[in-house]
Amino acid sequence: MIRLSALMLMGLIPACQADETVARYGAGDVLWTLVELNGAPFEARATVEFAEGGPMSGQAPCNRFTTENRVPYPWFEVGPIAATKMACPDLAAETAFFEALSSMTQSEVRPYTLFLRNDDGDEMKFTSPG
């Protein structure tokens, strides 16, 4: 009986841990729209949303996607990206978006602005309507 109680308690520990992802630090429950990629305007439409604990989803220029970001803020790292497979005229922009998103390692949340960056100097700038 004691062993069963200990196992049940251990199963609750992950649920009690605080969310330390970018979602908790101001990015959660907000629709972020990519406005710049490496300092240049991003002409296609791409969005991201962060849920508590790490799930992340959005709309790339052609397809919906989902992934995870479970590292603590300000770090950023996405897991494998799962996306629908629809073709559209913006496939080049979509490829650039996914490649950039996959390479980001740091995040910074400011009022109405989210920056994702990496050590190579690449940057994605997102905004929200507020």
Image (spheres, rainbow, N blue to C red):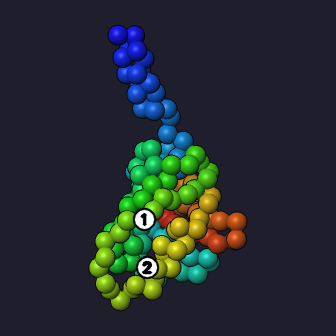
Q: Earlier in the sequence, mark 1 or mark 2?
A: 1
Q: Amino acid at mark 1?
A: Ile
Query: Given the image, on which type of amino acid does mark 2 rest?
Result: Glu
The quarter in which the C terminus is drawn is: bottom left
Q: Nearer the viewer, residue 126 or 103?
A: 103
Please indicate, yes or no, whether residue 54 appears anywhere in the rendered image: yes
Q: Residue at x 31, y 84 (%)?
A: 87
**Image spot of residue 84 (x, y percent):** 31, 71
Q: Is residue 121 above or below residue 18?
A: below
Report which residue position mark 2 lands on. 94
Q: Nearer the viewer, residue 4 or 39?
A: 4
Label 1 crowding class (10 Å Cα cut-off): few <14, some 14-19, many 20+?
some
Q: Could you say which is closer to the camera, residue 45 or residue 9?
A: 9
What numbered label is drawn on residue 8?
none
User: Is there CB contact under 8 Å for labels 1 and 2?
Assistant: no
Q: Decide if residue 113 is on the left or right side of residue 94.
A: right
Q: Is residue 122 left or right of residue 125?
A: right
Relative to residue 38, is residue 103 depicted above or below? above
Which residue, as the protein is rendered here, is positioned at the far top?
1
Q: Residue at x 35, y 89 (%)?
A: 89
In the picture, the quarter occupied by the N terminus is: top left
x then y, percent, for residue 74: 62, 51
In percent of width and height, residue 96 lies at 50, 79
Task: Please identify the quarter of the rendering in which residue 83 is found.
Answer: bottom left
Eye-nearest disc, 1 or 2: 1
Q: Which mark is residue 81?
A: 1
Query: Can you say whether 71 is above or below 127 in the image?
Result: above
Q: Residue at x 40, y 15 (%)?
A: 3
Badge 2 density bin: few <14, some 14–19, many ≥20, Cα 10 Å = many
User: Residue 75, how many percent across, how many down?
Assistant: 61, 53
Label 1 and label 2: CA atoms lie apart by 12 Å
At 39% from the left and 77% from the top, the residue drawn is 61
